[in-house]
Image (cartoon, helix red, strand yellow):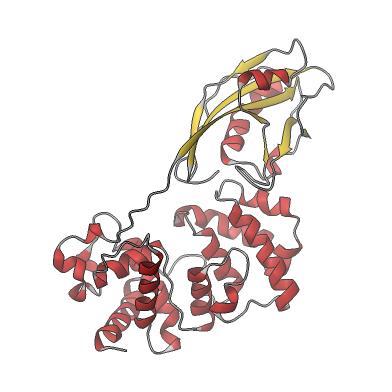
Amino acid sequence: MSGASVRFATRLVRWQRQHGRHGLPWQGTRDPYRVWLSEIMLQQTQVATVRDYYPRFLARFPDVAALAAAPADDVMALWSGLGYYSRARHLHRCAQEVVAHFGGQFPRQAETLQTLPGIGRSTAAAIAAFCFGERAAILDGNVKRVLTRHLGVADDLAVAAHEKALWQRADALLPTSPADMPAYTQALMDLGATVCTARQPRCGACPVAADCVARREGTPERYPVKTRKLKRGQQTLWLLHAHQTGQTAVWLHKRPARGIWAGLYALPAFDTRSALLAALPAGVSVTDHAPFIHVLTHKDLHLHPVSARLPGHAAPATPGAWHADWAALGLPAPVRRFLESNASTAHAGDAAPLLPSPASNQEP
């Protein structure tokens, strides 16, 4: 380990203990269940959002055995609104595998942790470093930014060989003492989140600025380099909000295991308005609501909600069932907002054309 690497690790550990974040609800524990849960929740999700969900999730599922034993629908319901629902499905499967194959105890090595559903290399390293002091490097988006700037790595990280090389350099920077691994790992996360930010980094507050190549060049914002962009698409869906006069139940169906809103309960979706109308009994009046856009990671959904009051015990000619307890189900964020916005007026028998607030930058 070179002198520069020792200085890097030592300065980060010292900085974290004095200036890093210490008040987050998932800090101060070496319980791998709690660390794992926080790491999964924090993927692609802001800390402020996770602060709300994390304690609620722990209250319902206090340990890995409780999570493994829970029905999948309960897990999805509690995750509802947090986005990127594949994380919740993998979370549930992972808990079941930990119980079934590891006696309810998380493996202590990052290499083994990586074999579990939903745990990638960086997440596995974080769990192993925080809980067991393993010398394993993390490399999430924030850390890539910190390291490429500090080291002056201008290689395109969209190329697998270049990212592999960065992993090797991250390994070389690890502190020699396992006891320093929790503070060092947290320091990298904190530095990327609060100081070495994507825009307007605060180089004057950085503990390793003296050796930073990007700061010396005066162009930290150009790092990291990644040319491959995610191709975005768009899709139009017509959502059927079917309810019965004076009743609170709405017609919902469980989405397939793959695709948009996989495994969630949702309003029936149609490609066209005419297809939606064809699923209704003859003579039923409808109310068209203002369309809105919901932003996913890979596409924009153009959603057109249409409410319909059905007489008596009639039901739409589309898969689903009446659900009076829809608020307790795992629902996509835009569907939940729509139903909450229209609950009182639908019960009164006159759904008003309310516009739900569009979400952005997260899967529903």
Residue 29 appears in which quarter of the rendering?
A: bottom right
Q: Residue at x 59, y 63 (%)?
A: 118
Picture quadrant of residue 183: bottom left
Residue 332: x and y, percent? Answer: 60, 41
Asked if residue 82 lies left or right of residue 141, the reply is: right
Q: Position of residue 251 (x, y in %)?
A: 74, 30
Which residue occupies 55% across, 48% down? Answer: 83
Residue 40 appears in the figure: yes
**Towards the viewer: 187 or 111:** 111
Provide residue 46's location: percent of width, then percent of height. 45, 54
Vertical placement of residue 150 versus 6, above or below: above
Q: Residue furthest top?
A: 283
Q: Residue at point 38% right, 69% down?
A: 161
Q: Quadrant of the C terminus?
A: top right
| Left or right: 109 as drawn, with respect to 65 | left
Q: How many marks?
A: 0
Note whether residue 62 is visible. no
- Across and down, in percent, residue 158 comes to 37, 59
Residue 87 placement, left or right of 10: right
Q: Is residue 223 left or right of residue 263?
A: left
The extreme right residue here reads 313
- For the N terminus, give its image quadrant: bottom left
Vertical position of residue 190 compared to residue 183: above or below = above
